[in-house]
Amino acid sequence: MNNMKRIDRSQKVRHGFHEAKWDEPIIYELSCPGERGVLVPKADKKIAEEVGEGTTALPASLRRKESVNLPELSQSRVLRHYMRLSQMTLGADVNIEIGQGTCTMKYSPKVNEQLSRTLFDLHPLQDESTVQGILEIYHETDKYMQEISGMKRFTFQPGGGSQGLFTMASVVKAYFDSVGSDRDEFITTIYSHPSDAAAPTLKGYKIIYLQPDPVTGLPTMEAFKAACTERTAGFIQANPEDTGLYNGHIKEFTDYAHKMGALCCYDQANGNAVLGVARAKEAGFDMCHFNLHKTFSTPHGCGGPACGATGVREGLEKYLPAPIVDFDGKNYFLNYDLEDKEYGVHKVRSFYGVAPVVFKTYCWIRSMGPEGLYQVTKTAVLNNNYMYKRMLEIPGVSAYYIDGNNQRVEQCRYTMEKIFNDTGVSTGDVQRRMMDFGMHYWTSHHPYFLPEPITLEPTETPSKADIDEYVDTLAYVLNECYTNPEYVKSAPHNSTMHQIDESGMDDPDKWAITWKTYLRKYK
């Protein structure tokens, strides 16, 4: 023991990281016919005499002609399979998750996760009398969202942020249909989330993009006035945009849109910059949506489950998708009797919300309180501005619109354009190399409006030490771009992942999204 050397922890960069890598087949390839994890007992004789084989009561059209195709494995093999997969996964509980910019990975309290498991046995078709508890949670969370945003009423029916945006576009369409208007244009900005354009497009609208001012990075009022006409149905924008820039003159935009007869939609999926500071109502928006995983810690869940909580101002509630949760003084109930039955949105999803997600939102808001929510914003903004200062100290890293004297708020989209021009190493190469240190790193939505982008968002979760470790690691990799560029280009080296041939990504004929599709195409 006396000969052992103390481990050197003076360097924050984890050079010794090596992720577990299993040569693990997909579960269908592990399947062994006849193998079982659970043996379901046969029905007692009396029950069998009463119900027969159990399917006779089903109409013939609902009975399977073939047994369901499921993998057949023992419990121990199922456990090994998923434990191995979990060891090949990075996430907010494993690594410092700063690199998923705009998607917002923050800590999700484990007590909330445990509480939400009490809802796993709920079924959306249960009688309302048996689900009074979760209906009350929906109703109370609606009230919290109203207070936070200034909106009049919320729905939790949308299954995610993009569907929340689609709900807002649908409300706009329903409103103008109800007044007999044929407006057919929607305005957004190029730095808002791409779904801000995609959602109205699905409703048949033509998209008018606002370009940024070359100095401030924000659209000008003159450009907005030129775009907003009698054809404009809606204005939809993220604020702050995905660059991290906040438009402090947004009320002038919404006022002018209203003057022209349009409705204004706030993509507030990420509210970490404005909790307790600014609300959608005072900014002049007619509706807004929150992504509960981004702002309210539900968590992200690798693209789902999420919830695009969508709220509208007074006068637009009748267009919301049904049902909404109401309280008659005695019971909570699903209210399908919305006012505008002809033009209302009716539904954007089969059932009402994701119960565990809304429950975790409720728990988080209650535990934080008004002061805590405000502190979330202060800490998130402080963390981002500290990180911003440190990032701009890295040789070759910059950010556009620095001369605009406009503060980044909760995130920033940086650029390593100079490093790429000097070395030929791209932001995608750096993304893969960061995996060798157990860290995630995000570039940008496509197309890249800013060259060689790096989009980072610390949120309120990481400490100063966490931010330092992440930035130090990224600085190390960016220095490698100059000292050993081929090593970066050939990364990852210590990760479970490897470089793949992406030449078929845009060819649907080569896609195999399910096991059955794979067997049909390639076996």
Image (cartoon, rainbow, N blue to C red):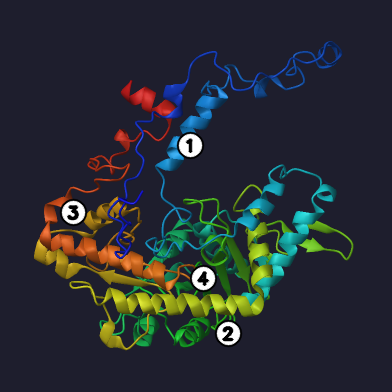
State the CA–CA distance, disc 1 to disc 4. 36 Å
Amino acid type of disc 2?
Glu
Which one is closest to the eye, mark 2 or mark 3? 3
Q: Could you say which is closer to the camera, residue 150 or residue 260?
A: 150
Q: Which residue is mark 3?
A: 488
Q: The residue tagged with tag 1: helix, strand or loop?
A: helix
State the CA–CA distance, disc 4 to disc 3. 36 Å
State the CA–CA distance, disc 3 to disc 1. 30 Å
Amino acid type of disc 3?
Val
Horizontally, residue 44 falls left or right of residue 427, namely: right
Which one is closest to the eye, mark 3 or mark 1? 1
Determine the residue positioned at 15% across, 66% down. 419
Give neighbour class at mark 4: few <14, some 14-19, many 20+ (Cα, 10 Å).
many
In the displayed structure, 116 sits above or below 344; it is above
Q: Could you say which is closer to the camera, residue 514 or residue 261?
A: 514
In the displayed structure, 473 sits above or below 304; it is below
Determine the residue positioned at 67% across, 73% down. 146
Residue 440 image offset from top left, x and y in percent = 35, 56
Pointer 2 or 3: first along the chain: 2
Q: Which residue is mark 4?
A: 268
Which one is closest to the eye, mark 1 or mark 4? 1
Residue 70: give its label. none
Q: The residue tagged with tag 3: helix, strand or loop?
A: helix
Asked if one can make out residue 336 in the rendered structure from this viewpoint, the answer is no
State the CA–CA distance, disc 2 to disc 3. 48 Å
Q: Could you say which is closer to the camera, residue 161 or residue 165?
A: 161
Pointer 3 or 1: first along the chain: 1
Q: Which quadrant of the figure contains the C terminus? A: top left
Q: The residue tagged with tag 4: helix, strand or loop?
A: loop
Q: Which residue is mark 1?
A: 83
Horizontally, residue 345 falls left or right of residue 329, namely: left
